[in-house]
Amino acid sequence: MKRAVIAAAVAAMLTLGLFAVPAPAAAQLFGRDKKAEPTTRLLLGKVLDNADNPLPNAVVYLTNTRDRSVKTYIVGPEGTYRFPGLQANIDYEVYALFNKHKSHTKTVSQFDNRTQVYIDLKIDAK
């Protein structure tokens, strides 16, 4: 008889939610309380020759691998380039051209969680 009363009381408590885990504690259990990851990131770097000298007026090409759109950047006297506002959940490919010479293509992976990615592009411009 006591077991039936206890079972009924436990069932009533479960129904009323007295044993429920509070929402903030539930979020902590499943890792949902982590800070939101940034939605954009910055790609920057330099275009250099084999002797690590900057190559002014080189053109840097950035390709979005999801929709195949391409952005370009003409580097200045220091050889630097900059692509802000890149989506964190998309892979990008980047390479540079200078006087018909091309650098190797580098990839910015969506699995790389850095907010700033720095890539130097080297061109054998003999």
Image (cartoon, helix red, strand yellow):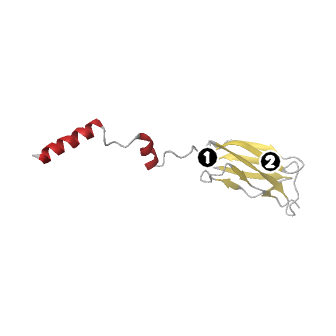
Q: Amino acid at mark 1?
A: Ile
Instruction: Find the residue positioned furthest to the left.
Output: 1
Task: Find residue 28 and report its horizontal and vertical position in percent.
Answer: 46, 47
From the viewer's perspective, tell me whether residue 23 is left or right of residue 72: left
Callout 1: 10 Å neighbours few (<14), some, many (20+)?
some
Is 4 positioned to the left or the right of 40 in the image?
left
Asked if the residue under mark 2 is in contact with the one under mark 1, i.e. CB atoms within 8 Å, the reply is no
Quick one: quadrant of the C terminus? bottom right
Mark 1 vs 2, N-terminal side: 2
Residue underneath mark 2: 81
Element assignment for label 1: loop
Q: Residue at x 50, y 45 (%)?
A: 33
Residue 19 lies left or right of residue 85; in this view the side is left
**Residue 24, position in %: x, y?**
45, 42
Give residue 26's quadrant in the image: top left
Q: Residue at x 80, y 47 (%)?
A: 81
Query: Considering the numbered disc 2 on the image, is that residue within a helix, a strand or a loop?
Result: strand
Q: In x, y percent, where is residue 107?
A: 67, 54
Quarter-of-image position of residue 106: bottom right
How far apart marks 1 and 2 lie (CA) works out to: 20 Å
- Asked whether 31 or 88 is in front, the reply is 31
Q: Which residue is mark 1?
A: 90
The answer to which of 41 and 72 lies nearer the viewer is 41
Percent from the top left, x then y, of residue 10?
22, 43
The residue lying furthest to the front in this view is 2
Callout 2: 10 Å neighbours few (<14), some, many (20+)?
many
Q: Nearer the viewer, residue 91 or 103?
A: 91
Residue located at (48% from left, 45% from top): 32
Residue type marked 2 = Tyr
Q: Is residue 24 above or below residue 97?
A: above
Name the quadrant containing residue 20: top left
